[in-house]
Image: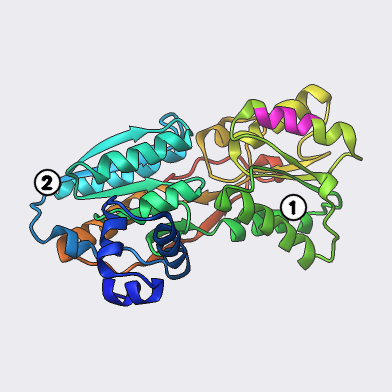
Amino acid sequence: MNIMEFARFAGVSRSAVSRYFNNGYLSEEKRKQIEAAVEKTGYAPSVSAGNVSRRVTKLVGVILPKLSSESCARVTEGISEILDKEGYKILLVNTANDSSRETEALELFRNNRVDGVILLATVFSDIHKSVLNKMRIPVIIVGQHLKGFSCITHNDEGAARALTGLMLEKGGERPAMIAVTQDDVSAGMERLAGFKHALEAAGKKFDSKYVEYAGFDMESGYRAAKRLFLKNESPDCLLCATDNIAAGAELYCREAGIRIPEDVMICGVGNSKIGRAAYPSITTARLHYKTAGAEAALMLLSAVKHRDSIQRTLELDYDIVERESTGGKCETEFID
């Protein structure tokens, strides 16, 4: 869809569309018309149109939610390895899980000369979508899917379903989950959906009282596990949305005298170092974070070099790594 076709769809002039994407003046009525059309079509201005007279800077903006996160570090490593080979440098912005800082970073890169942006996304607000739709440079999103943009995603639903299925096949009768916010589509909504689908496939009824919610850290996992075990008949298998949460749940179980895996099997997601070092070591799904970063960098380079405005989504698969928390062995394996 070109700008003229989009303008006709939105019921406004081409100049109104141009002013919208360049922060020019528009009446509130026309702005709402264009925003509604963007939401329906996923339209964004052609990257090539904004870059015809623009020289390549060899700079790429990378926005990540947490500098100390192991998964973010692995994604960034993958990005850096690819871009370094092509002579590009990255400008890194750590938003500390602050959505306002995330949109500020997008605005910063939109108004300054970088060749593209790689966004390690968590939650998309209306403000995020508004700013992203005004970007005139390539934007690659890692970890989430957003219509109208090129994305690198993980099979979060499949990973959660497989881990839950593993525990049910090993004799689990009272499954429970510690999930994260459902505003986070991938780690929250899709992993909870995988848990539910596994129960359905096994002929078990989902019971919301066996789901607790936590942040992404070990301490929050500990508190959620305590709430879960104190208010219910003890679960005998527990899926945690992340390895950090699983490590916190294990800590609570050890303090409460709940044996792992004899009394409760526990799984996490992410294949982090904490999962290997925990006692017992944590069964998990390996998500290929470094590969995600590398693929995002390659996708961005293609968009920059070839003025490619075609949006693509690449979903990376997972591997199940069974360890002591479900009766497997503690083994060291390669992490990407």
| Residue found farthest to the right | 233
Which label is found at residue 310?
A: none
**Which corner quadrant holds the N terminus?**
bottom left
Horizontal side, residue 204 vs residue 224: left or right = right
Q: Quadrant of residue 45?
A: bottom left
Q: Nearer the viewer, residue 325 or 55?
A: 55
Horizontal side, residue 198 vs residue 105: left or right = right
Q: Quadrant of residue 220?
A: top right
Residue 294, image x, y percentages:
31, 52
Residue 277, image x, y percentages:
56, 30
Vertical comparison of 17 with 235: above or below? below
The span picked out in magenta is 220-226
Residue drawn 44% across and 59% down? 29
Residue 291 visible = no
The residue carrying mark 2 is 57
Helix, strand or loop for disc 1: helix
Residue drawn 45% across and 59% down? 32
Residue drawn 40% across and 61% down? 30
The residue carrying mark 1 is 167
Disc 2 or 1, which lies upstream in sequence? 2
